[in-house]
Amino acid sequence: MESKRKLFLTSAGLPKETKDIFLNFLRKTPGRTNVAFIPAASDPEENKSYVERDKKTLQDIGFKIKEIDLKNENKKSLLNKMSECDIIFIEGGNTYYLLDQIRKSGFDKIIGQLLNEGKIYVGVSAGSYIAAPTIEAAGWKHTDPDRNAVKLKDSTALNLVPFIVTAHYNREKYRVAVEAGVEKSKYPVVALYDTQAVQVEGDKYQIVGEGRKEFFNGFKENK
């Protein structure tokens, strides 16, 4: 991974437990920061209230938002629209659908270039899953596994980080189910509570926010 790449992989966006940490991670003040907001993963979801909640959070912080619908884009148009954006915010929802749209739009072919230019990647749930080498965790049987309605056969993701994130973790409820998935995986795994994120800067990884740090398969924080 390029040393200057910065990612903030979250379970539930920017709650109060991680918001200030993220703001300290920025290259510019919020008022001078443009966000490419990509809600594609929410398209199949019946309840999209979390999308509006996250947009309001970003706006309340002071970010300038440009919403981008991947269904209407290609590599050239995405590069053009994101050229003046500082943050690429990938919203949560259905991970299989999101990965399908990312491939069809060509986003997967340009994200590396955008990160190398200094843009910051923020993932929420599904948006964090696709930053991994594979989206296999989306099918693990804790919370509600994503439906593969698009019949995606290849689970290869963006491979922006060498580990997997599983979101919305709760030790008491989901540890057994997550460990069953971990046993089948060859990748290090971070289980994130909704009050946490993984802050990535080059090859440095740190779990930030509030709650017990839960990781498996040899994941190591490198601060």
Image (cartoon, rainbow, N blue to C red):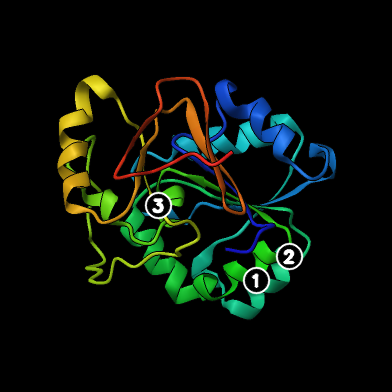
**Marked residue nearer the N-terminal end (2 or 3):** 2
Quadrant location of the C terminus?
A: top right
Residue at the image point whose x is 23% and y is 59% from the top: 148
Q: Which residue is mark 2?
A: 117
Measuring from the top left, give residue 189's x and y in whole percent: 34, 44
Can residue 100 be seen here? The reply is yes
Give me the C-alpha separation between circle 2 and circle 1: 6 Å
Measuring from the top left, give residue 220's x and y in whole percent: 43, 41
Q: Is residue 43 left or right of residue 9?
A: left
Name the element at disc 3.
loop
Quadrant of res 162? bottom left
Name the element at disc 2.
loop
Near mark 2 (Cα within 10 A), the count class, few <14, some 14-19 or many ≥20, is few
Asked if marks 2 and 1 touch (Cβ < 8 Å), the reply is yes
Give me the C-alpha separation between circle 3 and circle 1: 20 Å
Q: Which residue is mark 1?
A: 113
Near mark 1 (Cα within 10 A), the count class, few <14, some 14-19 or many ≥20, is few
Q: Is residue 136 left or right of residue 41?
A: left
**Marked residue nearer the N-terminal end (3 or 1):** 1
Name the element at disc 1.
helix
Quadrant of res 172? top left
Give me the C-alpha separation between circle 2 and circle 3: 23 Å
Residue at the image point whose x is 46% and y is 67% from the top: 102
